[in-house]
Image (cartoon, rainbow, N blue to C red):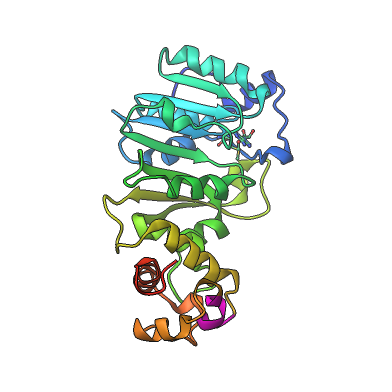
């Protein structure tokens, strides 16, 4: 295995610091530094960008990010056992790595960074979707980050890039694709990780668009999409009744079949419906 820096191989790091993986923390480590460098490269040119990494663990991806030229990496790790291994990386890249020991759900790390900011992470499966939704729904758009390059369980990655008419299509696809370009850039088998998870994983690369693809009030769009897919097997006229008792007439006026199901409806129609529901004079609430 080629080394990307002068630090010890990751297996030696794990043995030296006794980093037995903990399932409760979603710990499936990447130990192949060629692979972590490849993931870092899939985030695009890192030189000149600050990078947020959630869950560095023993630091395989962190080393890839630094070796690929990230200006600065801020890494948030919940498991204090990983800190000595990360301190060795800090020492090898003076002034370029900052590690915060804490829960990424409780810290707003983006506030500690200077744009341009890229987020790159092999996310713990138990908090991955929640973090993604937070990054996709900031108070204002464009967001403070320019790209997100994130490893998920493959099934979650497929939900992010899904198109209408597929089982995977739903809230995550709409939230992601409304204001981002989203694509799967790498798929990895369980054997890429230590310990191996039960299923394949995939890296999704999301680029923030300067403007949403179609105008819509964000909060209303989120409400419409949540209502539509909470009862995805129901027809829209039933699933959306809670938003407007006259929803059937409204859908007809907008040219959306009231008998259609959420998974048949494209982003443009959801945006049109959210705009209509939010506009005064149309019983908007
Ligand atoms: N980046 C490392 C790699 O690729 O080998 C480790 C990835 S592992 C899938 C997920 C990491 O996230 C673990 O190191 C785990 O301790 C950490 N973690 C889990 N929950 C976390 C949370 N809420 N906040 C920050 N880190 C968390």
Q: Is residue 282 above or below residue 152?
A: below
Residue 280 vs residue 259, the one in the foreground: 280
Rendering coords of residue 58 (x, y %): 59, 27
In this rendering, the answer to whether 16 lies above or below 267 is above
Q: Bounds of the magenta span?
A: 234-241
Look at the image and say whether residue 54 sits in the magenta stretch.
Answer: no
Q: Is residue 116 above or below residue 14?
A: below
Front one among 101 and 93: 101
Left or right: 229 with respect to 209? right
Residue 237 magenta-highlighted: yes
List the single residue furthest toward the front: 281
Residue 278 spot, x, y in % from top left: 38, 66
User: At which x and y percent is residue 10?
Assistant: 58, 27
Q: How many marks?
A: 0
Residue displayed at 66% across by 41% down? 26
Q: Residue at x 47, y 17 (%)?
A: 6
Quarter of the picture for ligand 1?
Answer: top right
Q: Quadrant of residue 214?
A: bottom left
Q: Quadrant of the C terminus?
A: bottom left
SS assignment for the magenta stretch, majority: helix
Q: Residue pushed farthest left?
A: 210
Judge whether residue 1 can be spotted in this image: no
Residue at 30% in and 62% down: 215
Residue 79 in sight from this viewpoint: yes
Tell me which residue sits at (62%, 50%) in the image. Answer: 190
The image quarter containing residue 64 is top left
Residue 277: percent from left, percent from top: 40, 70
């Amino acid at each position: 295995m080629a080394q990307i820096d002068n630090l010890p191989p990751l297996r030696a790091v794990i043995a030296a610091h006794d980093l037995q993986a903990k399932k409760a923390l979603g710990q499936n480590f990447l130990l192949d530094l060629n692979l972590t460098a490849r993931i870092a490269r899939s985030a695009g040119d890192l030189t000149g960008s600050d990078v947020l990494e959630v869950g560095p663990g023993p630091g395989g991806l962190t080393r890839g990010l630094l070796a690929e030229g990230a200006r600065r990496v801020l890494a948030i790790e919940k498991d204090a056992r990983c800190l000595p291994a990360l301190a060795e990386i800090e020492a090898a890249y003076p002034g370029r790595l900052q590690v915060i020991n804490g829960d990424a759900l409780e810290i707003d790390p983006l506030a500690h960074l200077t744009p341009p900011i890229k987020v790159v992470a092999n996310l713990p499966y138990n908090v991955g979707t929640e973090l993604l939704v937070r990054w996709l729904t900031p108070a204002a758009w464009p967001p403070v980050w320019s790209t997100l390059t994130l490893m998920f369980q493959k099934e979650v990655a497929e939900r992010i890039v899904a198109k209408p008419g597929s089982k995977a299509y739903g809230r995550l696809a709409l939230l992601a694709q409304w204001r981002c370009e989203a694509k799967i850039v790498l798929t990895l088998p369980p054997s890429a990780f230590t310990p191996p998870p039960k299923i394949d994983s995939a890296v999704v690369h999301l680029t923030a668009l300067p403007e949403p693809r179609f105008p819509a009030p964000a909060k209303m769009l989120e409400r419409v999409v949540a209502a539509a897919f909470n009862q995805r097997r129901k027809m829209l006229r039933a699933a959306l009744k809670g938003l407007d008792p006259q929803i059937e007439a409204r859908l007809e006026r907008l040219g959306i079949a009231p008998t259609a199901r959420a998974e048949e409806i494209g982003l443009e129609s959801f945006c049109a419906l959210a705009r209509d529901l939010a506009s005064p004079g149309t019983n908007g609430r």
